[in-house]
Structure formats: structure tokens, C-alpha cells
Image (spheres, helix red, strand yellow):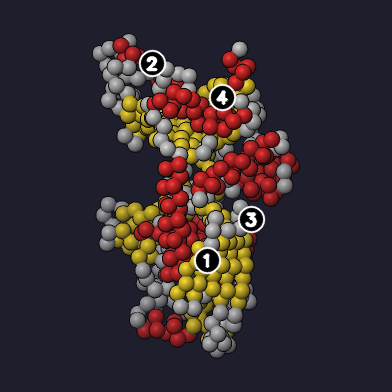
Amino acid sequence: MTDVLDTESARAAARSAERGERHASPRVESSEPSPPPATGQPLTGSDLVEEAQTASVAEAAEDDARWQHTLAGPAVIEGRGLFYGDAVTCTIFPAPPDHGVVFERTDIPGAVQIPATIANVTPRSRRTTLKLGDVTIETVEHCLAALAGLSIDNALVRLNGPELPCGDGSALPYVEALRRAGIGRQDAQRRYCRITEPITVEEGDSLIAALPAERDDLQILYDLNYPDEPRIPRQLHAFRLEREAFVDEIAPARTFSLREEAQALWDRGLCHHLTPRDVLVIGENGPIDNAYRFANEPVRHKLLDVIGDIYLLGRPIQGRIVAYRSGHSLNHQLVYRLVEKMRAEQGLQANLQRQMDVRAIMKIMRHRYPMLMIDRVVEIHGDQRAIGIKNVTVNEPFFQGHYPGTPIMPGVMIVEAMAQLSGLLLSRVLEHRGKIAVLLSLDKVKLRRPVVPGDQLVIEAEAIRAQTRTANVKCRALVAGQLAAEAQIKFVMVDAEDEAN
Ligand SMILES: [Zn+2]
């Protein structure tokens, strides 16, 4: 699923580049080394105005949707949990690319972290709860909905209690705090889950389905229908996920309960700190001591819960979700099914895109010992991302002189390995066009730690800007999971025949 998407977004980027649309990658054609997209910078009104000069706002939003986002600074939300009512402070911190959303209990020794993924969900009635070992974090769905609605991919949510603050029962307290903190684009592409075939889960009268759609965004249709419940007439609401629309139309919708449901909770000692003034309790004549924010506030809140729950997939969805009377447990089942499908497709892709051993590498690359710096390619995703291995042995010729007593791999050789893997990645598209990639510039080269005999270098190359004439590849080299070096490498595409002459 993801690989289908990765290929498609690469094609879209290529089409855009071929049309000469500078806005799609505004900095690439500069003769200066090209900087990455702004990291950790809040998006401001003037950013949008600048974009609008060269492109429509819709196109700018489309470009923005390609990148991961995090907060520009911490966001603080204080309050009491919905069910247990404990006072709690929740602080949401920025997090690096590919971190995802992770919750952390700071009131427990060792500060237990629980990633917000479906694998960590434990069954609870009327809410979404994460559990790892014997540590739980209750009622995460409205916080997750706020992060999903604002397109925040990476965040560390720290709280000093077992349950998130409920505020007014909507996602608004989270949205406001997150917007105050600011949202910034990160230097890594988003990976979407694209729905390619219908998946439906049903339970009794409830149903939720994920369906393919023509567009690259997420549309949700919710049908709230309790035929025997006159206090909440049937409500249908369709919503296309987009930041501003989420803030205005979905985030303010509050959780609700019928009078007798609320009474049952109070009788069990739950939600005792809340009165109908604080949350929506629906009686014979509508909300008790309260008023609806929207005529169809209940269905909008059900939609909000769906947005929060499906974010447990760990990546945004492109497709259409149709829900009929679906609650948290059915929403979770849909996410399980999507994860299963994603895994099956990834396994298939891995088999199709077999690993490359050194003989396969040498068919593509002209480098030979001692200058062939990649032993094996362990993963390759289209023309977007590759992971290669270089086993550093004491027999490497450079160790003879660098330095005999304390052998350290020269930094330039690590960079050479990165450049070779990048060239190999780019060659996957170029070979069909009769072109090859030639190294143009190195930027942001940082050597973080020495690499010595016995180390295994794991090199990652990710194409961050690929156009018809130039390409930028972001590279990292790790030893035992620790960053050893990084660089951004720019290539220019030349005709294979020209280069040979
Ligand atoms: Zn809810």
C-alpha cells in the first residue's frame, strides 16, 4: 500500500517538476546548496502568501501534505481526566521525523513510553486506552484526533497521571495548545496508507469501511442513527480532512451521553467531577443546562473519534471512510485490518524487491574493490529510499595509513559509501531514461563518531528532491543504531553516452 503510494507521489513530483513548477520544490534550482524544507518553523500566514504568489493555495497544501510535521515548541494542556477525574498536566513535545506519536507516563518510575499504535490498544468501554505491561494511558482519542487533524506526525505526549485531560470533551483544548506552540514542516516525507480495495468490519448493526478514492486525501462519512432514540435524531456528516476545516468544524464537537448513561457513570463513581454544564448530557429536550455548538454536534463528535482512532495506524490514510454507528471498538478493528493488509503488502514488496548482493550491485555500479563501498543492499523502496550495508574490516586498504596504530575509517570514505548508495537508488529510474547521476555537491556533511574495524555501517539514502535534471539525497550512516555520519548529496543527471565520451 505504502509502496504504491510512494511510487505515485514520486510520479506526481516528477510530473510537477516536468511542468517546471518551482513552487513544488522552490529551492531546488538555486545554484546554492539547496537547504532542506524549514524544520521546526511554525507555518505563518506570510508563508502561505508567499506560496500563493506562485501557486494556488490548494497546490501549496498538496505540497505541504507530502512532508512530516511536528510542533515548533512544547504545548501544555492541564485539567482532569474524563472518567477518573485526576488532575493531570499533559505536555506535548516536538519529536524527530519517523518518531510517530508516543505517550509517556512521567509519574511512574522509569517514565514508561507507549507508542500510539493499535498494537498497544487495550479494550475499554467508550474510550481508547493504551497499555504496555501493566501501565495504562486512558482516553487518548481526542488528543490523537487533534494531532491527526492538524497533520502532526511526530510528537511526544508526556503526562503525569493515568488519563489525559478531558477539557470540555472536545478536541479544542488540544488544538488550541498545539496551534499556540506552532506547527513546523520536517525534512522527511510522509508515508501514507493508501486504501486500494474495500475493507469492511461489522458488528451487530454497526459498520465501518475503508474504501479507495480518487483523491490523495481522507474523506469520512459518518451516519449516526439510533432508530429507537428520539432524543438524537439521525445525523449524517461528511468531512474531508484538512487543517482549517478540522479546527472549525470538527474539533469543537464535544462528547455526549444520554441522561441515564451519565447517571450510570456517576452511580459507579466515574466522571463525578463533571456536571451537565461541563459536558453534553442529553435529556428529553436536548442538552441539559447546556446548548449544542452545532445542530448535529453528536455526529461531528463521532467523526472526531474516528479521526483519533484511525491515527493508531501510525500513518495518515488516503481514501474514504464510511461509518455507520461505529464506536471505538469497531474503529480499532478497522485499524487492525489495515495494519494486517499493510504488513501483507510490505512482505510481498520485500519479496519482489529482492535484496541486492554484491554481484547485483556490481552490475549497476562501475566501482570495484577497493572503491566499491557497498557490500549489500538490504532494502530498496522504489526510487525513494534504500538501505545498504558496508562491513568495515581491518583489511580495508585505507587503514594501512589512517592510522596504523589506531585505525579510523576516513570520513570521506563514509561519504563515498553514501554517494554510491544514492547513485544506486537514483539509477533505478535513470536507467530507463538513458541517464546517469553524477555527483554535484555535498552539503551538511557531519561526522558524528569514529568508525573502526569491526563496525558495520548501515547507510540510509532517501531521495528528498528528484527532478528531471537534479536530485537531492539525504543520507545517514549508523553504527549499532548510533549516527556516525550524515550528508545531503546533490546529483545532476547527464546522458549516459555523454558521460562515457
Ligand atoms: Zn470522543
Which of the 4 image quarters holds residue 81? bottom left
For the residues bearing labels 2 and 3, Cβ distance under 8 angstroms: no
3 or 4: tag closer to the N-terminus: 3
> What number is the disc on residue 89?
none
Q: Is mark 1 within 8 Å of ligand 1?
A: no
Amino acid beneath label 3:
Glu
Q: How far apart are labels 2 and 3 at the CA level?
A: 50 Å
For the residues bearing labels 2 and 1, Cβ distance under 8 angstroms: no
Which of the two residues, 305 or 19, is positioned nearer the viewer here?
19
Q: How far apart are labels 1 and 4 at the CA level?
A: 44 Å
Query: What residue sits right under mark 2 in the picture?
Result: 370
2 or 3: tag closer to the N-terminus: 3
Q: Is mark 4 within 8 Å of ligand 1?
A: no
- In the picture, the quarter occupied by the C terminus is top right
Can the viewer see residue 4?
A: yes
Q: Residues within 10 Å of mark 3 (few under 14, many from 20)?
A: few
> What number is the disc on residue 214?
3
Secondary structure under the numbered disc 4 in the rendered image: strand
| Residue at x 45% of width, y 74% of height | 203
Left or right: 430 with respect to 354? right
Amino acid beneath label 2:
Pro
Q: Residues within 10 Å of mark 1 (few under 14, many from 20)?
A: many
